[in-house]
Image (cartoon, rainbow, N blue to C red):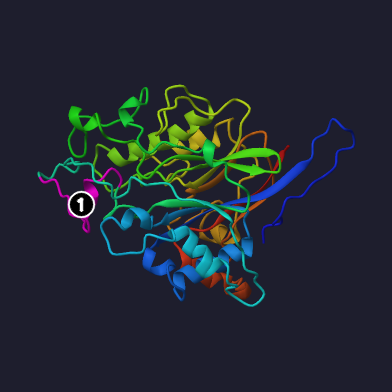
Amino acid sequence: MAGTTALATTAGVTSARCAERTATFATYNIEDLTTEQVQSTGDEQAAAAARVIQEVRPDVLALNELVNNVQESAVRDVPRTPTNARAFIENYLRIPQRDGLDSIDYEYIYVPKSNTGVHSGMDLDNNGTIDKTPGDQTYGNDAYGFGRYPGQYALAIASRYPIEKSALRSFRTFRWMDMPDSEIVRESEGMSLTDEEAEHFRLSSKTHVDIPVTIGEHTVHALLAHPTPPVFDGPENFNGKRCHDEIRLMADYVAGADYIYDDSGACGGLSEDASYVLLGDMNAAPGNEESLDAAGTYFLENENFNTRRLPTSPGGAQAGSPYLTAEFGKQVDYVLPSPDIAIRNSAIVWPSKNAQKNGLSDDVQTASDHRLVWADITSKA
């Protein structure tokens, strides 16, 4: 389906021209894929997701809502190793999931820690109780990012190209109050933060990460995030404003904002000459009021992202718009390169209702309420 599965090199007509290198970047929210599902074979949802991935064969794949079992194992009796990302690769992606499909392997993975289910020690939902017992809704409400246990709804990246681990940056502990002119909700009705809570509260509901990937002699920064859904709150719009600022953090990062600091304490955003691709379920559609149109402002109308060729699908068109990426009728999943990167091809894996090619229509529905989004990108090295 996606055109390129390996690097393609084109010689220039003069020595001044650079070689073009093309790779497929993709993002896929596989709705709450759990440890129990991926640590063994035979799970229907995991197999369906693997079939979709084997159809596209991305070189760099961002996964949303894959449980971080290393974190989960601190409170639940689950395997700590291999990581769920590695288990999904070994138990599903390395095995052809249908006749005519080939296995796919990813040598390089990175699984960052997530704020989901990490307890804050505070009564964040203002119900008068600090619930420190994992497993239920009230525990999740008092975590930095909603999760009934640590590591739920986490994320990972799998790559066929080397990850520059020494240059990885994560922003999981960045405080919301440290963003200048933020939308932080303080001392209001409903969900809000007291002065003491704001001193500790983290902006990222999962994590924001910068993962440099080496493609040939060129580095492309894969930027991953999964902001909180802008719902499940009241008129104060706590989650909507948090989603807005989680998205803004990514835009400020690629713009080189100096206020940003990572988990190691290093300050600043990307350098001006960096190449990057933003990946993930951003939980915000263009024009969405709850998230204050963060997707429109910071992604689609932002000259720091290449939006000249947005992915589309026939299934989305039948559901209301070719740009939709989820069954609930929203464009929320994005693959957005930097302006120096050309988009050769792109699509959303959502067949039309009457196109039952190799069972792919059934697979996309079984795998998730989101659709895999991919783009073939070309950078110069």
* Pointer 1 local density, CA inside 10 Å: few below 14, some 14–19, many at least 20: many
Please say whether residue 138 is one of the residues in the magenta stretch.
yes
Tell me if 33 is positioned left or right of 190 in this view.
right
The front one of 136 and 164 is: 164
As helix, strand or loop, the secondary structure at mark 1 comes to helix
Q: Is residue 163 above or below residue 267?
A: below
**Quarter in which the N terminus is drawn:** bottom right
Q: How many marks?
A: 1
Picture quarter containing residue 303?
Answer: top right
Residue 381: x, y in percent? Answer: 73, 37
Tell me if 157 is positioned left or right of 54 in this view.
left
Q: Residue furthest left?
A: 128
- Residue under the image location 36 percent in, 55 percent down: 70
Q: Residue furthest right?
A: 13
Tell me if 290 is positioned left or right of 109 in this view.
left
What span is colored magenta in the figure? 129-145
- Residue under the image location 61 percent in, 71 percent down: 355
- Residue under the image location 80 percent in, 35 percent down: 18
Residue 107: x, y in percent? Answer: 59, 56
Residue 44: x, y in percent? Answer: 45, 74
Overall secondary structure of the magenta section: loop
Q: Is residue 194 above or below residue 34?
A: above
Asked if residue 150 shows in the view, the reply is: yes
Q: Is residue 192 above or below residue 154?
A: above
Q: Amino acid type of disc 1? A: Tyr
Residue bearing the label numbered 1: 139
Please say whether residue 151 is one of the residues in the magenta stretch.
no
Asked if residue 327 shows in the view, the reply is: no
Residue 115: x, y in percent? Answer: 33, 45
